[in-house]
Image (spheres, rainbow, N blue to C red):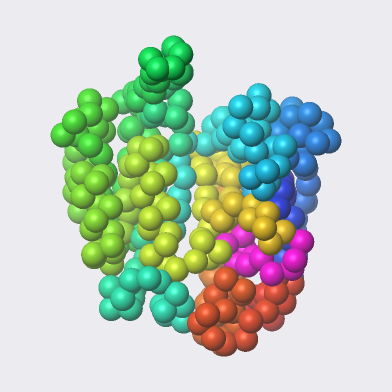
């Protein structure tokens, strides 16, 4: 099959890690049509907006999107939160334009990197979970959302809003995911104090009856944040709403010890030309402007995001496995990026890490 991919490197280290990722994909002799576009700050400088209509259309026509990172230093003209045009509008616009409602963030602890975690080895060894976060609802999008009044009587409001359909489609994805893994789903909410939490819990429990082969549990989100640090191995698929998913997925990412190792996928219900889910795949580490251009960024999260793309948007599980095994092999061989140099071994730069993956494919 021909893989039509929209590659959007973005800002900071995005272009560096994207280059190595495309090199890995090309080394696998895949039949690809890669179309590149500008997003984020570089698009603002060039076109005046973070995401042009042409770039969005290109992404909509592609089978899948590879996304680098957007944003600049804190003192950058791009970074003023009061600006009407901001780099992060690119990713928000792509999520909306592509109908992406679920963010999948795998959290896996590699034996070779077990000492990178701040938790004890006996706690994190064997951790392998997915955080499934709802992307389009909740307090990030509810209305009203505004600041009111003048000092000393200022006030602010954020509205958390969900429909049953939004909850149902995410939970269905969670149960389907679990069926292909260890058959365990945890749903995190605040049903004790929030009406939306009670809706999530009610709908999730109704759906659990459709999946009698999957073990299901409700957990309060604050309690789960504690359990993730005490018994992370006990979790398989964690499903939750937007705000809690944002917080819990970042906490879980640090269990593995490095943001540079963490891929992600954002998926919707739209199917591509090959009959698989169209999705957007990106590393979670951000643009890291402090090291941009130095050739020391860790490309593994971007490369693993491409492996997720092959699995989810093209059904190429064997090819995805090849990439993931190559990464595991180079780590076992003692190859380290700069963010992991404290673990010892051979520390190499961005291009060398990309080449090391290709060597082990």
Please tell me how many numbered marks the rendered image carries: 0
Task: Name which residue lies at 63% across and 81% down.
Answer: 347
In the rendered image, the residue lying farthest to the left is 192
Quick check: is 298 in the magenta stretch? yes
Q: Residue at x 33, y 71 (%)?
A: 119
Which residue appears farthest toward the top when viewing the image? 149
Query: Residue 245 lies in what quarter of the image?
Result: top left
Residue at image x 16%, y 34%?
192
Q: Position of residue 70 (x, y in %)?
A: 66, 45
Is 223 rendered above or below residue 262?
Answer: above
- x, y percentage for residue 232? 28, 64
Q: Which residues are magenta?
A: 293-303
Residue 60 in view here: no
Foreground residue among 199 and 63: 199
Q: Quadrant of residue 195?
A: top left
Residue 298 lies, with reference to residue 204, above or below; the image says below
Q: Residue furthest right?
A: 46
User: In front here: 144 or 303?
Assistant: 144
Residue 255 vs 275, above or below: the answer is below
Q: Main secondary structure of the magenta part?
A: loop
Q: Is residue 103 magenta?
A: no
Look at 28% across and 67% down and name the residue there: 233
Residue 338 placement, left or right of 213: right
- Residue 246 showing in the rendered view: yes
For residue 179, which quarter of the picture? bottom left
Question: Which quarter of the figure is the N terminus placed in?
Answer: bottom right
């Amino acid at each position: 099959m021909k893989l039509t991919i929209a590659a959007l490197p973005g800002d900071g280290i995005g272009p560096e890690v994207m280059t190595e990722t495309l090199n890995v994909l090309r080394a696998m002799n895949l039949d690809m049509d890669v179309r590149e576009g500008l997003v984020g700050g570089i698009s603002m400088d060039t076109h005046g907006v973070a995401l042009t209509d042409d770039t969005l259309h290109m992404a909509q026509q592609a089978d899948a999107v590879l996304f680098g990172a957007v944003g600049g230093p804190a003192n950058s003209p791009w970074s003023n939160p009061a600006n009407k045009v901001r780099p992060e509008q690119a990713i928000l616009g792509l999520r909306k334009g592509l109908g992406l409602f679920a963010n999948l963030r795998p959290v896996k602890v590699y034996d070779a990197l077990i000492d990178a975690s701040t938790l004890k080895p006996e706690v994190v060894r064997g951790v392998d979970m997915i955080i499934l976060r709802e992307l389009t609802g909740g307090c990030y999008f509810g209305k009203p959302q505004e600041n009111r009044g003048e000092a000393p009587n200022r006030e602010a409001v954020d509205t958390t809003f969900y429909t049953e359909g939004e909850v149902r489609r995410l939970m269905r994805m969670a149960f389907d995911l679990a069926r292909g893994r260890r058959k365990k789903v945890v749903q995190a909410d605040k049903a004790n104090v929030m009406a939306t939490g009670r809706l999530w819990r009610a709908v999730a429990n109704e759906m659990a009856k459709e999946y009698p082969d999957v073990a299901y549990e409700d957990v309060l989100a604050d309690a789960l944040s504690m359990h993730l640090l005490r018994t992370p191995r006990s979790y398989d698929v964690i499903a939750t709403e937007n705000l809690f998913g944002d917080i819990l997925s970042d906490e879980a990412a640090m269990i593995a010890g490095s943001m540079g190792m963490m891929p992600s996928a954002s998926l919707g219900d739209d199917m591509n030309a090959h009959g698989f889910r169209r999705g957007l795949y990106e590393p979670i580490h951000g643009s890291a402007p402090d090291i941009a251009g130095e050739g020391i960024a860790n490309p593994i999260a971007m490369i693993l995001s491409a492996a997720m793309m092959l699995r989810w948007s093209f059904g190429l599980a064997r090819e995805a496995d090849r990439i993931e095994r190559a990464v595991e092999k180079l780590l076992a061989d003692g190859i380290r990026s700069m963010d992991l140099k404290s673990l010892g071994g051979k520390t190499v730069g961005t291009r060398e890490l990309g080449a090391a993956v290709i060597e082990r494919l």
